Amino acid sequence: MIILIMFSVSILGYLHEAKAQYTGVNDVGSGTGIITCPTGEEHEGPIAFEGFSSPSFRGAFDISTSIPSPSGELLKSGVINYVEINPSGEFILKGKETRDDICGGLGTVASIPIVITGVCDFNPASGVLGTVKFRAANGEKADFPSSPTCS
């Protein structure tokens, strides 16, 4: 009987580990990507983001340019209001762009829907980067070399 209980507990532990539930993803600063504006204009810069699905959907993102303007660093930023992370680490973050100094914007913008997708890096020490994709409903897009982490 004791052996059966111990076996059951070990199987339950294995099943729990195999079906990991991630509730957060974050990237404190990726490699440099090329942001392509709807006009075809391009800018270089990294993306940083975080998104959480528990206890509620929340998060934020920003993309800054490598070359500052006379008025300071150019920035694209917004909020994350939907987070989905599957057990293999693939994630989808949805939100709204609320500031855009990069693609012809003048600071505050109407809430343009955005999507950020990628795969979490479970072995950051390897030095192998994946790709994080940023897409906006107005046609802005960028791919960033990145190693986001899931928790």
Image (cartoon, rainbow, N blue to C red):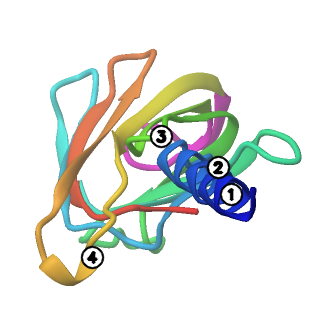
Q: SS class of the residue under badge 2?
A: helix
Mark 3 burial class by Cα count in 10 Å: few <14, some 14-19, many 20+: few
Q: Is residue 71 left or right of residue 34?
A: right
Quadrant into which the N terminus falls: bottom right
Q: Earlier in the sequence, mark 2 or mark 4?
A: 2
Q: Marks 2 and 1: CB-CB under 8 Å?
A: yes
Report the mark closest to the observer, 2 or 4.
2
**Res. 12 mark:** 2
Mark 4 burial class by Cα count in 10 Å: few <14, some 14-19, many 20+: few
| Cα distance between the residues tagged 2 and 1 | 5 Å
Q: Amino acid at mark 1?
A: Val
Q: Is residue 56 left or right of residue 111?
A: right
| Cα distance between the residues tagged 2 and 4 | 28 Å
Residue behind mark 4: 124
Q: Earlier in the sequence, mark 2 or mark 3?
A: 2
Report the mark closest to the observer, 2 or 3.
2
- Specify whether residue 103 is in view: no
**Residue found at x 30% / y 67%:** 30
Q: Which residues are magenta?
A: 96-110
**Res. 9 mark:** 1
Front position in the image: 32 or 148: 148
| Cα distance between the residues tagged 1 and 3 | 22 Å
Q: Marks 4 and 3: CB-CB under 8 Å?
A: no
Residue 3: quarter of image: bottom right
Q: Earlier in the sequence, mark 4 or mark 3?
A: 3
Q: Earlier in the sequence, mark 1 or mark 3?
A: 1
| Residue 108 is one of the magenta-drawn residues | yes
> Looking at the image, which residue sits at the far right?
55
